[in-house]
Image (cartoon, grey):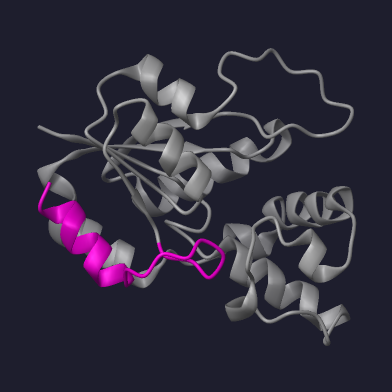
Amino acid sequence: MKTIVWDVDDVLNDLTRLWLDAWRVAHPSCVAYKDLTRNPPDSALGIALEEYLESLDLFRQSRAYRDMPPVADVKEWFVLNGKKFRHAALTAAPLRAASASAWWTLTHFGEWIRAFHFVPSKRNGEMIVEYDRSKAEFLRRRGDVDLFVDDNAENVAGATQAGINALLFPRPWNGSKMAVPELLARVAAL
């Protein structure tokens, strides 16, 4: 049975869109989600990276994150195709938000996703033992991955360079020309 490793935020869920919706309440003139050209979007928002990360981390620990629905097309794909593959999650959440991400993932996808992994995102003031510097390092060490799905072009390129088949999940900031249903059809054809 083939193994698929899924990124969590902005693949299984719409974290950036929902975080930005909340941010726009206090900053109504900021950039629209569809116009994001990079993630993290700190420069598009005109704020320091640390301010963005702090706000995102607070959102990850909020009820809004816990109540966030899965991406409908992805959830439907799992209902129809999930049993055909083994699944794991791999995120780059900071240590302080990893448990919220694990809870969210297993609550919505635990019927299929049986392993949750994270490569901690660095945050100021956190001293964390570093096992893997990137998702690609983790995937290479894990060794049994048939496909990796992520919204970050750098992560997809790193996985590909490590010899792992990878797909770029379409988001405004990554330039993917593929629609979500097309990507999911490719995953199903694995």
State left or right for residue 147 relative to residue 124.
left
The correct choice, above or below, for 121 with respect to 14 in the image is above
- Which region is colored magenta? 170-190
The residue at 60%/37% (across/down) is: 99
**Residue 130 point in image, percent of width and height:** 65, 15
Q: In which quarter of the image is residue 30?
A: bottom right
The correct choice, above or below, for 161 with respect to 152 in the image is above
Q: How many marks?
A: 0
**Residue 43 point in image, percent of width and height:** 81, 62
The correct choice, above or below, for 80 with respect to 35 in the image is above
The residue at 39%/15% (across/down) is: 141
The residue at 67%/61% (across/down) is: 63
The correct choice, above or below, for 135 with respect to 149 in the image is above
Q: In which quarter of the image is residue 148?
A: top left
State left or right for residue 82 relative to residue 95.
left
The residue at 68%/34% (across/down) is: 121
**Residue 1 point in image, percent of width and height:** 9, 32
State left or right for residue 112 relative to residue 189.
right
Q: Reply yes or no: does residue 182 show up in magenta.
A: yes
Q: Reply yes or no: does residue 145 show up in magenta.
A: no
**Residue 105 point in image, percent of width and height:** 45, 47
Front-most of residues 126 and 164: 164
Front-most of residues 176 and 14: 176
Q: Which residue lies furthest to the bottom in this view?
A: 29
